[in-house]
């Protein structure tokens, strides 16, 4: 019996370290492992060299509906759904693999990841709770994250119908000024 608990604790420590390296928030670590809050705080400081960020987890689906977060959330969900259909991965293992694929793709494209691991984890929970759904764009045929129960007939994504200020960030303005 004692041996099983030691193995379980070692597994939780490895998992917590991997999640911390991927940027998980403390609340996510508490939900996904059986380690105490004090143990997780020590691990976080050991892995990251700083205390974990404070504050509540995102609890609204609205963040996923704004233009840039929606594009990134939809890309993550494309990887998540592909892996869900074509592998035996499930649960947190599936989220981690999909998040790694998403991070690698945006990194290779020279972009910053807009979606954090904690937001991806939260979004999957929103899908499981039927608070979010996928909607297919009538123009490009891509699938995008949308509020559950919103009408999806005639849906046009944020890439096909970009907001006027899309991409007009301070960084883009600074890069244009430098060029």
Image (cartoon, grey):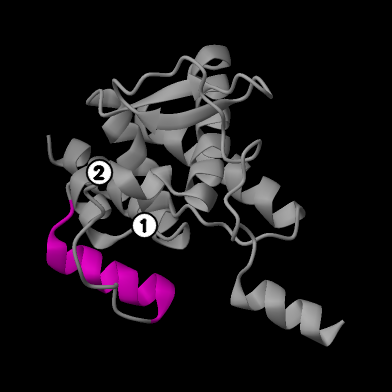
- Give the percent coordinates (x, y) of residue 60: 24, 47
Q: Please state which of residues 88 and 124 is positioned toward the viewer in this rendering.
A: 124
How many residues crowd mark 1 within 10 Å: few (<14), some (14–19), many (20+)? many
As drawn, 137 above or below 44: above
SS label for mark 2: helix
Residue situated furthest bottom in the rendering = 178
Where does the C terminus fall, quadrant-wise?
bottom right
- Give the percent coordinates (x, y) of residue 7: 27, 42
Q: Contact, CB < 8 Å: mark 2 with mark 1?
A: yes
Is-magenta flag for residue 38?
Answer: yes
As drawn, 32 above or below 25: above
Residue situated furthest front in the rendering = 164
Residue bearing the label numbered 2: 32
Q: Is residue 22 visible?
A: yes
Sequence-first tag of 2 and 1: 1
Q: Can you tell which mark lies on residue 118?
A: none
Q: Closer to the observer: label 2 or label 1?
A: 1
- Tell me where the magenta segment starts and ends, as one range: 35-49
Is-magenta flag for residue 23?
Answer: no
- Give the percent coordinates (x, y) of residue 58: 26, 53
**Main secondary structure of the magenta stretch:** helix
Residue bearing the label numbered 1: 24
How many residues crowd mark 2 within 10 Å: few (<14), some (14–19), many (20+)? some
- Residue at the image position 79 percent from the left and 77 percent from the top: 176
Q: Is residue 22 left or right of residue 25?
A: right
- Give the percent coordinates (x, y) of residue 99: 52, 43
As drawn, 54 above or below 160: below
Where does the N terminus fall, quadrant-wise?
top left
Q: Please state which of residues 20 and 166 is positioned toward the viewer in this rendering.
A: 166
- Residue at the image position 20 percent from the left and 40 percent from the top: 3
- Residue at the image position 36 percent from the left and 75 percent from the top: 46
């Amino acid at each position: 019996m004692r041996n099983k608990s030691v193995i379980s604790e070692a597994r939780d420590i490895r998992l917590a370290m991997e999640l911390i390296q991927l940027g998980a928030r403390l609340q996510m670590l508490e939900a996904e492992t059986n380690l105490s809050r004090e143990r997780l705080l020590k691990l976080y400081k050991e892995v990251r060299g700083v205390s974990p960020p404070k504050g509540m987890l995102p609890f609204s689906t609205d963040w996923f509906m704004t233009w840039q977060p929606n594009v990134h959330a939809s890309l993550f969900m494309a990887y998540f759904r592909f892996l869900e259909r074509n592998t035996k991965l499930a649960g947190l293992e599936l989220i981690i693999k999909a998040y790694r694929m998403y991070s690698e793709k945006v990194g290779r494209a020279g972009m910053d990841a807009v979606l954090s691991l904690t937001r991806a984890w939260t979004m999957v929970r929103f899908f499981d709770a039927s608070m979010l759904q996928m909607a297919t764009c009538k123009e490009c045929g891509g699938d995008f994250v949308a509020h559950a129960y919103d009408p999806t007939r005639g849906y046009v994504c944020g890439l096909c119908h970009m907001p006027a200020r899309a991409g007009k960030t301070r960084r883009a303005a600074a890069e244009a000024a430098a060029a």
